[in-house]
Structure formats: structure tokens, C-alpha cells
Image: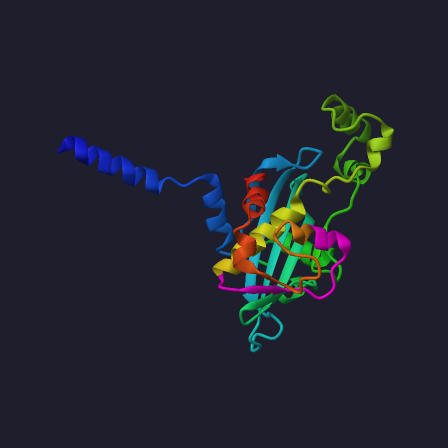
Amino acid sequence: MKYIYNLIMKEINVQQERTPYQEFLDQACTCDGTLLRLPKKTSLLGHELFLSVRYSTDMLFPQLDEFFLNVDVFALINGEYIPVGMRDFQVKGNRASGNKNMHQRLPAIHGAHVASDKRWGEAGFAVSEEDLMKTAEKVGDVSTIFSQLRSEQIISSQFDYGKKTYQEMGIGSLMTAVALKVLKMKNIEHIEFDSLSSRADSLWSKFGKQPDQAELDVSSATNQNYTNTAIEKFV
């Protein structure tokens, strides 16, 4: 009997164990604006990255039957959370669209959100195009920073000073994947597309969008292997 009991308890413990990925998704899907650290990646200058999710009715017009989803990514630089990426969606019924910046329609939960609400333009998706030189100038001694980057083989010459600090890291895919997980949890069935740039269309194709497709099934996109991989690279 003791042997059987131990087997049962072992199975229960296995079922109760949560991976960092699962824990991250659980926290992200609460949509409470908590800044969640992304432990597997830092910026090219070594700064920690954080992700935040907000989901709320319209702060300006709460009587309207619509919601807004905001996913932000921040870099922690000298104790300050710097906005480096964002993706927004407007939700009506069981459909979502993501063509416009909706930050001003959501309450700021954290000081980082205030900075993000001021940072971005009209588009509903963006990743900072700041280059290494500009970021280094904000951080401290430029020569010391670039010497360190050379020793880490992140750059090889002065021609690399213009390399983008946050591009090509997968931040755009991460924000999109997290947004899909949240939308599915909220029982949103479709994402509608208006006009997409070739770059945006290429990103969505990784989540199953076909050329000239006007909408995307959220459940199907969420089940794409790429969706999980995009998150697991950071968590």
C-alpha cells in the first residue's frame, strides 16, 4: 500500500510542477500590468528586459462595448524602464484589430506605462530602432561600452556602431505570441487586418497568415509551433 501511495503522490507532484514558461503565461494572461522579467535574453548592451500586458475597457469612454489589449517590452537602464517595443489591439465582440496605438485608452498601472504611453506614435506595433551608439550614449562611457562589446564579439568594428540595439532579437514575435495567447484566453476568435506593410505581413506569416488573407483565426495561430517558440526564447 505504501508503494502505491508513493506512486500516486509522485504523479500528483509531477502534475503540480509548473515550468517557467507556464508560470510566465499564467502571469501574462492576468493582464494586470505587472512587469515580468524575460530571463533568457538581454539587450545587446546587457540590459534586462521586461514584458507587461494590460487589458481593459476604454478609459476615455468606458460605456463603449470594446476592450484594448496592450503588450509592452521595456529595457531596465540605470534603474529606469525604457520602452523598446509595443503591440496593441482593439477588441470588439469576438474580433480584434491591431492597426493603431491604443496606449492612451488604457490606465497606466506602473510608471513604465506612463513612459510607454508617451513614447510611441500612431502605429499599433513597433520595436525601437535605436542604434548601439545612441543607446551607449545614454548609458555611460561610450568607449568603455564599445570595448566591452568588441570583447564579447557583438561588434567587430566601428561600422557596427549603427547596429540596432533591439531589432532582430525576436521582440516583435514575442509580443505577437503573447498577445495571441491572451486573445485566445479572452475567447477572441479572429484578428482582422486592414493594410499591412510587407514587413508586418512577413511577421504574421510566421503565425500562419496566408498572402492576401484579411483575417486570422486566433486559435489556429496560437497553436502554431512558432507561437510557443517565440515566447520560449525569452522565458
Residue in the foreground of this view, choosing between 153 and 143: 153
Q: Is residue 45 left or right of residue 177?
A: right
Question: Would you say 9 lies left or right of 96 here?
Answer: left
Residue 80 visible in the displayed image: no
Q: Residue at x 71, y 55 (%)?
A: 201
Residue 225 or 46: which is nearer the viewer? 225
Percent x, y of residue 20: 47, 40
On the rendered image, what quadrant is the N terminus found in? top left
| Residue 143 vertical placement versus 84 (above, below) | above
Pinpoint residue 46: horizontal percent, then vertical percent.
67, 33
Total of numbered circles in the picture?
A: 0
Task: Examine the image and state in which quarter residue 146 appears.
Answer: top right
Stretch in magenta: 186-202
Q: Residue at x 37, y 39 (%)?
A: 17
Q: How is the image coloured?
A: rainbow
Percent position of residue 8, x then y:
23, 38
| Quadrant in which residue 166 is drawn | top right
Residue 138 lies, in percent from the top left, at 77, 39
* Residue 34 vs residue 189, the one in the foreground: 189
| Quadrant containing the C terminus in the rendered view | top right
Residue at the extreme front of the image, as rendered: 211
